[in-house]
Amino acid sequence: MTNRETVAQMVDHTLLKPEATAADVQALIDDAVELGTFSVCVSPSMIPVELPESLKLAVVVGFPSGAVKPAVKAFEAAQAAADGADEIDMVVNLAFVKQGDYEAVESEIQGVRDAAPKTLLKVIIESAALTDEEIVSTCEAAVRAGADYVKTSTGFHPAGGASTHAVALMRKTVGPDIGVKASGGVRDAAAAEAMIEAGASRLGLSGTAAVLDGLEG
């Protein structure tokens, strides 16, 4: 069984409900400190926020559909970085993927990379909505564009969230030097351990306490 503290330091403790208030975000931060997570992940309208030095701040961009202009995503990323984001989780334009236009996918990601060059960049590919071939090609485009991580899911798409199959395929595609984040539907310790075994190096969790409570140590 994976150590609780080790897993906690892989967690982006997440609150992305549209109705979340500033008080809810503060409660998220307080929980994250108590749980020992790596970061909190919030919507861009909720920042800037005060964080202890122990926590990183992740912010979503183009969320949840990804269906905004590339220039809008780039602006949103630049604003998030200016507001204190340490990490950006951007959603790709799934229409570009489904059309097989991976040059457009790469260009869009590159635009966000250039807009926030010092901020760690995770690219959400919405893996449950893609074929294996689309997962591979999208991950390859993300790596070419300078992404630091590829991420399975927003958690909002009706196709579903993370799967061990997608995580394993993403890890195989990007190799050992790019991060893989499993997010969406990881609700207990067994699921978290399965994602890590498949190759996840980060977990996006909203029910973090329930996951960590199932781990030893």
Image (tube, helix red, strand yellow):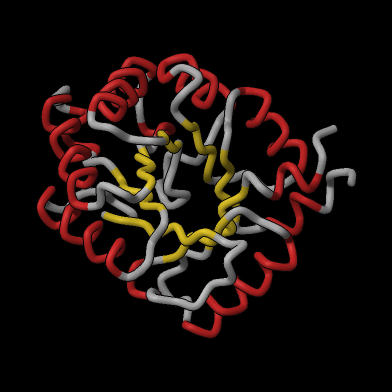
Query: x%, y% of residue 180?
Result: 49, 32
Q: Residue 7: name its quadrant.
A: top right
Tell me the residue at 26%/54% (across/down): 62
How many numbered badges does the structure rendering display? 0
Depth check: 126 or 143 in front? Answer: 143
Query: x%, y% of residue 90?
Result: 32, 48
Tell me the residue at 13%/48% (across/down): 70
Q: Is residue 107 left or right of residue 89?
A: left
Tell me the residue at 48%/83% (across/down): 22
Query: x%, y% of residue 199?
Result: 59, 24
Q: Residue furthest bottom?
A: 23
Compared to residue 172, the image places residue 20 above or below, namely: below
Depth check: 96 or 37 in front? Answer: 37
Query: x%, y% of residue 173?
Result: 41, 16
Q: Is residue 6 left or right of residue 90?
A: right
Depth check: 177 or 99 in front? Answer: 177
Q: Quadrant of the N terminus?
A: top right
Q: Residue 128: name its quadrant.
A: top left
Q: In this view, does 28 lie to the left or right of 181?
A: right
Q: In this view, does 115 lie to the left or right of 215?
A: left
Tell me the residue at 58%/34% (across/down): 201
Q: Residue furthest right?
A: 217
Depth check: 100 or 77 in front? Answer: 77
